[in-house]
């Protein structure tokens, strides 16, 4: 195991321990922040980067989350929900659409924090329900794609096994069974080769 992998594994373990420790003390916001830390370590920091860049990324996430919470009242749990929704959109290949939808939700919360009643009358709250429906649809798409990938893998395994040269023969090298790949190698059919002597 490389030093970079050991470093990310230790950070991840520390994040898990700190998260459960803070949860026991009912510090929900800090618990969510440590979960963010763990997610960043597992997903983003697995890329080979300089150690200083990794620490700057972690500190940057901390500062941005704190500023959003202080200035606009956006809680860390809300940021976590947005991050989870983004992961779902990205895994389904809907990056542009997911970014537009999540940006609309963030703008709505910023406008609500600014107490502009005129803007609050806009139909932006309906996007929350749309987001829920879209997330369910994306999860269904992911399940269908996963099942399709599994079926494609099984089909590929069957095709690979058919490319292997398989034959059975008697002690006097008379062929008793050949698979289609073996027959294709000698430009013949299995029925024509069975009963003949072993061909090297």
Image (spheres, helix red, strand yellow):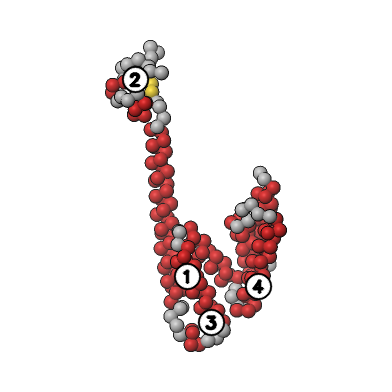
In this view of the protein, can residue 190 be seen by the observer?
no
Question: Does residue 48 lie above or below 78 as drawn?
Answer: above
Q: Is residue 143 above or below residue 104?
A: above
As rendered, which of 182 and 157 lies closer to the eye? 182
First-in-chain label (2 vs 3):
3
User: Marks 1 and 3, Cα distance to the nearest angstrom?
Assistant: 18 Å
Q: Which residue is mark 2?
A: 176
The residue at the far left in this view is: 191
Q: Residue at x 45, y 66 (%)?
A: 97
Confirm whether residue 130 shows in the render.
Answer: yes
The image's mark for residue 66 is 4
User: 124 or 10: which is nearer to us?
Assistant: 124
Dot 4 or dot 3: first in sequence order is 4
Q: Secondary structure at mark 2?
A: strand
Dot 1: few (<14), some (14–19), or many (≥20) neighbours within 10 Å? Answer: few
> Mark 1 near mark 2, Cβ–Cβ under 8 Å?
no
- Label located before the other in sequence (1 or 4): 4
Dot 3: element: helix
Disc 2 to disc 3, C-alpha distance = 79 Å
Q: Position of residue 78 (x, y in %)?
A: 56, 71
- Residue at the image point whose x is 41% and y is 18% from the top: 200
Residue 112's disc is: 3
Mark 2 or 4 closer to N-term? 4
Between marks 1 and 2, how big is the CA–CA gap? 64 Å
For marks 1 and 3, the one nearer the N-term is 1
Residue 153 locus on image (x, y percent): 42, 43
Residue bearing mark 1 = 100
Mark 2 to mark 4 CA distance (whole Å): 75 Å
């Amino acid at each position: 195991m490389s030093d970079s992998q050991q470093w990310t594994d230790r950070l991840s373990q520390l994040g898990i321990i700190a998260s459960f420790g803070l949860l026991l003390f009912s510090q929900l916001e800090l618990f969510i922040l440590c979960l963010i830390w763990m997610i960043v370590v597992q997903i983003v920091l697995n890329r080979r980067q300089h150690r200083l860049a990794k620490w700057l990324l972690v500190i940057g996430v901390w500062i941005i989350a704190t500023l959003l919470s202080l200035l606009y009242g956006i809680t860390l749990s809300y940021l976590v929900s947005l991050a989870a929704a983004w992961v779902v959109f990205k895994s389904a290949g809907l990056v542009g659409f997911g970014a537009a939808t999540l940006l609309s939700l963030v703008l709505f919360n910023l406008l609500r924090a600014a107490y502009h009643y005129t803007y609050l009358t806009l139909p932006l709250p309906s996007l929350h329900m749309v987001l829920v429906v879209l997330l369910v649809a994306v999860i269904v798409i992911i399940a269908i794609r996963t099942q399709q990938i599994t079926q494609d893998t099984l089909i590929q395994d069957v095709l690979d096994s058919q490319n292997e040269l398989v034959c059975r023969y008697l002690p006097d090298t008379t062929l008793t069974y050949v698979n289609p790949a073996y027959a294709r190698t000698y430009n013949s059919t299995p029925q024509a080769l069975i009963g003949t002597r072993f061909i090297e």
